[in-house]
């Protein structure tokens, strides 16, 4: 993106003041748009003040010579209809946790960005690196589908990154051949009945558990703690308060496969999320 600066006026006092109009184009570079003293006929800029406009506020980053643009934070939970073009759509706000994606006919299973979706799946880019698990905050979230979606739109409900405590505790973890690649330092695999992955921390929400067996991508269904695992490679059990995820032995989580976990960790006692997390099981009746 480039800035268009016009109607430049100079007034001379103890220092040279400049009045000018600044126009942004249709895109915005993360971290701000560059502007130099030369753009307005000066040798240096000591202070730059921009009036709010159309709901946006502006900040002059003197160190990096950039104008940053801000707008009012979104709601904590947001639902929107997303137009999908050439199998890709974009959310309005950076997402911290996807609740669901659907075109009213297909409930799409969420997988991490960097994996190739198949039928009924959507790869969601929330800013995590697939190779390191490092999160780039504030990134506009993209949705990549395997094929066209019904009606060309999907409905998405998600928690935005406006809720700092949620964003601070976003995690993507990965194990390959049963060995930690990234995630909590205590992330570990143990062969048992069933096989168990210790996350190293408790969870308050889990967006996806996705098994990559060679080139086959399988997002798994989570069932209640104490439940019975069914068909291999389709289900897992999450023990929220002990930070454990169990798999059917035939899933062979520790052999020629990678497993990706996207979740919100429990920040611990005294935090808003921990103190309001209710682990009471709903009766079957």
Image: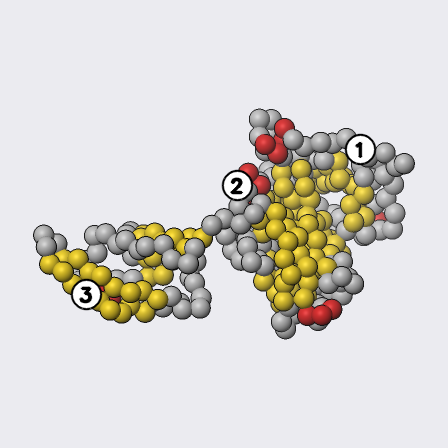
Kind of element beneath mark 3? strand
- With respect to residue 192, does 161 lie above or below? below
Q: Nearer the viewer, mark 2 or mark 3?
A: 3
Seen as rendered, the residue at the extreme right is 285
Q: Which numbered dot is residue 164? A: 2
Label 2 CA crowd tier, 10 Å (few <14, some 14–19, many 20+): few
Looking at the image, tell me whether mark 1 or mark 2 is earlier in sequence order. Answer: 2
Q: Residue at x 47, y 50 (%)?
A: 72
Q: CA distance from mark 2 to mark 3?
A: 42 Å
Report whether residue 213 is seen. Answer: no
Give the x, y percent position of residue 184: 60, 39
Label 1 CA crowd tier, 10 Å (few <14, some 14–19, many 20+): few
Kind of element beneath mark 1? loop
Q: Residue at x 61, y 34 (%)?
A: 273
Position of the C terminus by quadrant: top right
Q: CA distance from mark 3 to mark 1?
A: 68 Å
Looking at the image, tell me whether mark 3 or mark 1 is earlier in sequence order. Answer: 3
Looking at the image, tell me whether mark 2 or mark 3 is earlier in sequence order. Answer: 3
Report whether residue 207 is seen. Answer: yes
Q: Are marks 3 and 1 in contact (CB under 8 Å)?
A: no
Give the x, y percent position of residue 256: 73, 54
Q: Residue at x 76, y 61 (%)?
A: 104
Residue on which the image places disc 1: 281
Position of the N terminus by quadrant: bottom left
Seen as rendered, the residue at the extreme bottom is 86
Q: Quadrant of residue 282?
A: top right
Q: Which numbered dot is residue 44? A: none
Give the x, y percent position of residue 23: 35, 66
């Amino acid at each position: 993106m480039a800035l268009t600066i016009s109607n430049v006026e100079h007034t001379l006092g103890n220092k040279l003041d400049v009045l000018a109009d600044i126009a942004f184009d249709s895109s915005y570079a993360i971290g701000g748009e560059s502007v130099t003293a030369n753009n307005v006929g000066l040798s240096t800029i000591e202070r730059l003040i921009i009036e709010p406009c159309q709901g946006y506020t502006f900040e002059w980053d003197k160190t990096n010579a950039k104008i940053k643009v801000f707008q009012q934070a979104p709601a904590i939970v947001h639902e929107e209809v997303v137009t999908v073009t050439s199998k890709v759509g974009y959310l309005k706000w950076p997402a911290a946790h996807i609740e669901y994606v659907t075109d009213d006919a297909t409930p799409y299973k969420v997988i991490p960005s960097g994996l190739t979706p198949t039928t009924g799946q959507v790869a969601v880019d929330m800013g995590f690196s697939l190779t390191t698990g490092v999160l780039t905050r504030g990134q506009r979230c993209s949705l990549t589908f395997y094929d066209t979606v019904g009606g060309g739109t999907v409905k998405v409900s998600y928690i935005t990154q406006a809720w700092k405590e949620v964003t601070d505790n976003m995690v993507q973890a990965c194990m390959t051949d049963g060995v930690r690649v990234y995630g909590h330092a205590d992330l570990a695999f143990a062969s048992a009945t069933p096989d168990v992955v210790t996350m190293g921390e408790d969870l308050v929400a889990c967006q996806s558990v996705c098994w990559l067996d060679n080139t086959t991508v399988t997002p798994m269904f989570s069932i209640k703690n104490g439940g019975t695992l069914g068909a291999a490679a389709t289900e897992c059990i999450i023990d929220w308060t002990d930070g454990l995820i169990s798999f059917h032995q035939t899933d062979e989580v520790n052999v020629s496969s990678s497993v990706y976990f996207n979740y919100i960790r429990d920040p611990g006692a005294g935090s808003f999320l921990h103190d309001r997390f209710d682990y009471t099981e709903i009766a079957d009746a």
